[in-house]
Amino acid sequence: ASEADLQKLAAACDAATFGVDQKDVLDESYRRAGKLDKTDFALNLDVVSTGLLHAVHNALFGWEDQPRNIKAELYKLNVYGPGSFFKAHKDTPRGEDMFGSLVLNFPTKHEGGALVLRHDGREHVHDASAAAYTSSEQVSWVAFYSDVEHEVLPVKSGHRITLTYNLYFTEGLTVVPSLPASEPLQLAFQNVLKDETFLPAGGRLGFGLKHQYPVPTKVDWGEEQKALQDLSHALKGTDRAIFHTAHLLGLQPKLAMAYEFEETGVYLLDSVYSGDGQVDSWADVMEWEKAELVEPYMPEPDAYGYEYYVEAAKKAVPVEWIVPRTSSTRVESHYVAYGNEASLSSIYGDLVLIVTVPEKDKRQL
């Protein structure tokens, strides 16, 4: 396309918004770009028949030995002209099954406008203006999970043209995966389990999760535990690799919420704490909720009530944390606290993965 054509395209665009709390917001101090909704343009591109969706699947899930059913739904066309940018943000999921985004970059000449991705302390830069991506015969693409922070750096000249697709898990479209690449992880697990000195009487391993997930907080009574375990189907990346490998080895992986209370300890709960009612003692509340104490609080021996904490610690069911707990998926629950008067307060739970290691003579190797 000529520069004149690109300027006409830019002129036809509306100002681009962005999602905040499930609402579209227009703020050009945060995002300056043009956009066309999918109903405002025609496109002769099929991401399935071209093999693009297959490539996306392999990039995100290629290590798995079971296929993931995914689909790509066209969302918007964006035009970033001189001075356009999009500050660091995370995408707003457009549904519970949405897990990521696919961005196609057209080979238009421009300077600047690199897409910067950040997650878990790492950074990747995709610069579609680089010579490797500006051939008129190719389109570059980037796919990433919804909880990956990303930004578009300012465009200095020319026009950066992109198509964005929302990526969903679905039962309607099967993408054939490549050969599994999780064998090294399975081998590592097996080597540990073969060591009879490793938890010889059995025990549990804990893994903090790397990605963010939509934990359901409002479910029907009696369905709380099922709702949390159903979330295992949405696990991504290394989180899913660990879960799947543990399942193959009979280690009974499950998701749980970890709650830490001052002068009480860390508890595991098989559902999100509902937050109903008055709280006088978190130890009593967790016992009522049938939560497990995994990290008991232990004061100094000369502290008041030391014997009480010693007795409480005897009930603990410890977890060996292979990957420390993270706040990637942190869920807020409200409760009524009482001091001089009643007030509404909050506690926060972190989603974690727990696997059970059988005693040494009952391990599946």
Image: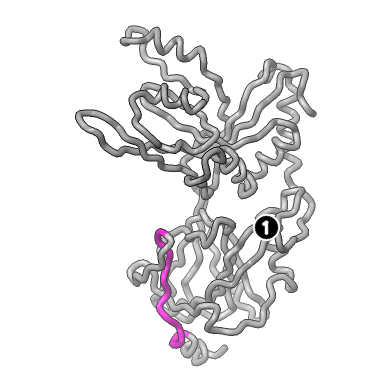
Whether residue 179 sits left or right of residue 59 in the image: it is right
Residue 147 can be seen, yes or no: yes
Query: Badge 1: how crowded within 10 Å, few (<14), some, or many (20+)?
Result: some
The image shows residue 232, relative to residue 109, as above or below, that is: above
Tally the marks.
1
Residue ID at (37%, 33%) = 277
At label 1, the amino acid type is Ala
Q: Position of residue 112 (x, y in %)?
A: 47, 72
Quadrant placement of the N terminus: bottom right
Queried whether the magenta region covers residue 355, the answer comes back as: no
- Residue drawn at point x = 56 percent, y = 74 percent: 163
Identify which residue is drawn at 57% across, 73% down: 105
- On the image, the x and y values in percent for residue 87 come to 40, 64
Which image quadrant for residue 225? top right
Q: Position of residue 191 (x, y in %)?
A: 74, 28
Whether residue 208 is visible to the viewer of this picture, yes or no, is: no
Residue drawn at x 46%, y 87% as measured from the top left: 12
- Which region is colored magenta? 10-21
Residue 199 sits above or below residue 74 on the image: above
Viewport quadrant of the C terminus? top right
Nearer-the-camera pick, 167 or 186: 167
Q: Which residue carries the number 1 mark?
A: 59
96 left or right of 287 in image: right
- Determine whether the residue tagged by mark 1 lies in a helix, strand or loop: helix
Q: Position of residue 166 (x, y in %)?
A: 57, 65
Q: Give the answer, above or below, for where 27 lies relative to 346.
A: below
Taking the view exactly as shown, the residue that stands out farthest to the front is 221
Q: Residue furthest left?
A: 340
Q: How is the image coloured?
A: one colour
